[in-house]
Image (spheres, rainbow, N blue to C red):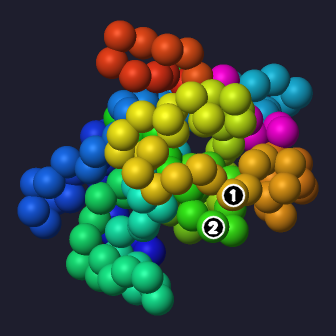
Amino acid sequence: VDERLHRSDIRSDPTSGTITPGTPLALTFQISRVRAGECHPLQGAQIDIWHCDAAGIYSDVEDPGFNTIGKKFLRGYQLTDAQGAAQFLTIYPGWYPIRTVHIHFKIRTAPLARGSFEFTSQLYFPDDLTDIVHTALPYSSKGRRRVRNQHDFIFRDGGDRLMLTPSQTDKGYAAAFTI
């Protein structure tokens, strides 16, 4: 699903204005490129993120358990600034039966130019932190999650290198990912 939603706060659904409930998460990407053996900030890259809500539901998806076609919560993109940074305000993700807790992301270089590149992957959270966050509402109403990081079929293939280390803030959590 590529909504083309250029926004930093992805908690709301622009079709209704409804804010998705959950523990706030400020997420910063720091994107660099390698040139002549040195890393330099990559300005103008498009960073898309999307993930499920506290109940494990994605927006704009039809599934046997839900239909959110037309909804646009927890999706958006930003362009990196001169320092290669892009920031998002979202919530800590929930879970669904076959996966560990994660956030999808896609990096697109020179999104409007020919010869652009795309990289799609996922970010993960420490199991012990997820256990703590998911004891509060609205997460706790879903019950205990079934899949931890080491048992996730995608995480097992290098997910430890895509692990966020969130720190607690007065409003929730903040995390940064450098790539």
Q: Are marks 2 and 1 in contact (CB under 8 Å)?
A: yes
**Quadrant of the image occupied by residue 129:** top right
Residue plotted at (51% across, 39% down): 134
Q: Is residue 155 above or below residue 56?
A: above
Asked whether residue 78 appears in the rendered view, the answer is: no
Residue 148 or residue 116, whichever sits in front: 148
The amino acid on which the numbered mark 2 sits, given as a three-letter code, is: Pro
* SS at mark 1 in the image: loop
* SS at mark 2 in the image: loop
Residue plotted at (36% across, 40% down): 137
Q: Residues within 10 Å of mark 2 (few under 14, many from 20)?
A: few
Name the residue carrying label 1.
146
- Give the mark nearer the N terminus: 2 vs 1: 2
Q: Is residue 166 above or below residue 57?
A: above
In this image, 2 relative to 99: left or right?
left
Q: Which residues are magenta?
A: 160-165
In this image, 126 relative to 139: left or right?
right
Q: Residues within 10 Å of mark 1 (few under 14, many from 20)?
A: few
Can you give x and y, in whole percent of width and height, for residue 170 in the image?
35, 10
Residue plotted at (75% across, 49% down): 148
The C terminus - image quarter: top right
In this image, 12 relative to 53: left or right?
left
The amino acid on which the numbered mark 1 sits, given as a three-letter code, is: Arg
Asked whether residue 125 appears in the rendered view, the answer is: yes
Q: Residue most toward the top?
A: 170
The N terminus - image quarter: bottom left
Is residue 158 in the magenta section?
no
In this image, 120 relative to 149: left or right?
left
Residue plotted at (42% across, 67% down): 58
Tell me the tag on residue 97: 2
